[in-house]
Image (cartoon, rainbow, N blue to C red):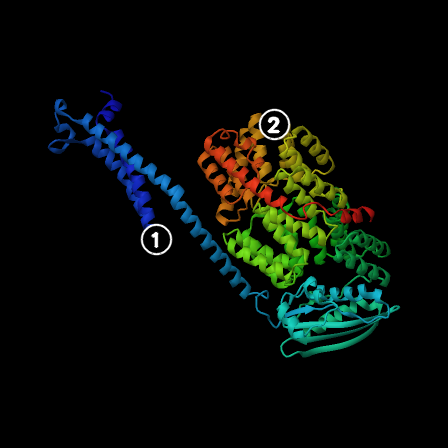
Amino acid sequence: MSLFNELKRRNVFKVGVAYVVVGWLVAQVLQLVFESFGTPDWAIKTVLVLLATGLPFSLFLAWAFEMTPEGLKREHEVDRSQSITSQTGKKLNTMIFAVMAMALAYFVYDKFVLSTGRETAAIESAVEEATSQIVTEQADTPEATSATDNSIAVLPFVNMSDDASNEYFSDGLSEELLNLLTKIPELRVTSRSSAFSYKDKNFKITDVGRELNVSNILEGSVRKSGNQVRITAQLIKVDGDVHLWSESYTRELTDIFELQDEIATAVVKALRIELLDEEMSSDRVTISPAAYDLFLRGRGERNENIAGSLERAADYLQRAIEIEPEYAAAMALLAGTYLDMDEFGSMSITESLRLSGPLVDRALELEPQLPDAWVALGYRQWRLDQNRQAGESFQRALELAPSNIRALIRYSNVLDAEGHFRKYLGLYRTLSELDPQNPNHEVTYEYVRAYFGENELIAESLDRLRKQHYDDPRFYDGSASYYRSTHQYDRMTSAMIRVQALRPADAWAPGNISSALFRLGLNDAGEQWLERTRQVNPNSRYLVLATYDQFRVNREYDTLTAFMRETWMKEATEANYSRLGSALMLEGKPAESYEVLKESLQKHPYEPETGNISLGMNGALWLVLAARAVGDEALANELLDKVGIQVRNAVEKRYYVLSNQALSAAYYAIEGERIRALFTLQQAAENGFAVPSDLETPFFDEMKDKPDFQAILQQVRDNQAMMRGKVLALDNLSPKQDSVSALTER
């Protein structure tokens, strides 16, 4: 008899299988028990080692011994004619099947019952950890929640000139002083937007200090007459309304930079902060009064953020640079203005990137220590989908000016894109403290915490903030973003309509409203808001987003491909690469899709440190399908590995909006993990996912005909129908024609 047959006769194989199955079940149960009693990790590891060690011993016993009616005997002592190994084998089969049934039951119980409890516990633990970490970090830094002696707000200096139009000069001088003070690491400086919210208002210093959470206030007045300026400044300690320092200056405008440095240095010394030489350097290029005047006018227009203000800002700054070709600050500001004009003005992203590049490079060449130049560079890199480089630029800006609000806000976009949840959450806590009068920061901070499961908290917070900031579009910016991410399209639409009324020159609101309406199947209303977006800014990327959704949701795939190809040829951004690639796949052209998406991946490969894909999860998954269709399994598997990391990070960090749940389900479906895909989709549907077209894609082709998938799809359609009814019930769903006419006439 061969060795194999002898092993089979003695039931060695069956004993081995039985041992492994029983051992696995024992290990699972013990792990659950150990976790309940808080047993150290080494205990379960010891059990696993012992179980593994026992396997060869069990195989040896099965070979050397045999079970008989009289008990266990050595195998050579048993008469073959009286051997009962066949009966023992049948008993082993029964035991194996029974234990496997128990193991399967345990798996189902663990997956669909215990895992829910573990996820809830993980959420609570993560929230507690993140909150405690933020509190600890801020207790050790100048950004702590309680006011410190080294916190200050620079209120807008009062214009005392005979000419009221000189308001821009007094405001600009105040902002210049604020920017100088932000360079001091030991000093926490309240943002311009919060400090300037007190402009032209009567107030008590103690009230301002309490509302801005600062210990010191710098205020003053400016009188400009011809080429001469008189400035009075005073530093007040909020506690007791005590004057720490005051001074009056009368200078020629040619000395304005030295005067600003002198005032800032005096303030810092009055606060008893020790300065480093480079923190208040006066080594500047001499700028003519005419160029400086244009610079202040340009910055004032950029801060206005109303119809035409960015265009006027660019004009002033261009003229300032014509007068002073080496004016680095004007170059950095003009570069940032061009980049803003894509979103809030009338310039395409291609043009804004083309114009801003040389300006940023030259500004940094002239003044490598200029924070605003690093902010402009980072902003440009972010628009080019170079997240890692953008993050480094923003970090450099914050090293030079720790309280620079623009740097913090722009850096938050990078952290969000990269999935650095705790840093993102902590940064918005800091923004809420440095810019307390801007409700967008607090809304964002609260709704990011809501992704941890604190939905009741976000509802209460939004209700409270809405009452406080009813006429502030920045509140609706933040709340609309939250509602969009959770598919509360009725509330999102209502919030964005409010933004449009308060900020009519902004294409962000009508573009997103249009996109949401198309996703809900409300084509007529969607087309009205699409036209509104086109009138506000015919070059806006939000117009592209809304038009893409219009054709995709209505399955006009050939039209979608033609539109995206034309858009991509004008502006080859990563987002447009991804949209064109998906359009080609939907039209049934995987080879063309593969070439387009692969070209994008070659231009902007994975971030080396994070492994994030510049195409995003959506574009990467489309490329996986395209690569498989053309036989490039190596690329498909490589991309799936990268996407898998992002999916696991999203689950672990709980930074998990509904659209990401659908993408995670798509990843599981492509990987063949049908149960996990269905479970994730079911969660999304129960949480309100309301866009069935996102599930009617090739990602789910292998499961689209399954009853359980169809049941989930129907639930999503029901969510859409319910949300559609709520949106149609809004009183002001159509764009106001008077606002459209006003925009057309300007």
Q: Is residue 520 left or right of residue 288?
A: left
For label 1, the residue is: 40
Labels in figure, total: 2
Q: Is residue 307 left or right of residue 118?
A: right
Q: Is residue 671 left or right of residue 346?
A: left
| Residue positioned most to the left | 70
Give the x, y percent position of residue 104.
34, 36
- Between 395 and 237, the one lying in front of the other is 237
- Between 732 and 375, the one lying in front of the other is 732
Going by the numbered disc 1, the residue's amino acid type is: Pro
Give the x, y percent position of residue 108.
37, 39
For label 2, the residue is: 590
Disc 1 vs disc 2: which is toward the camera?
2
Residue 273 in view in this figure = no
Going by the numbered disc 2, the residue's amino acid type is: Pro
Sequence order check, earlier mark of 1 and 2: 1
- Between 90 and 683, the one lying in front of the other is 683
SS assignment at label 1: loop
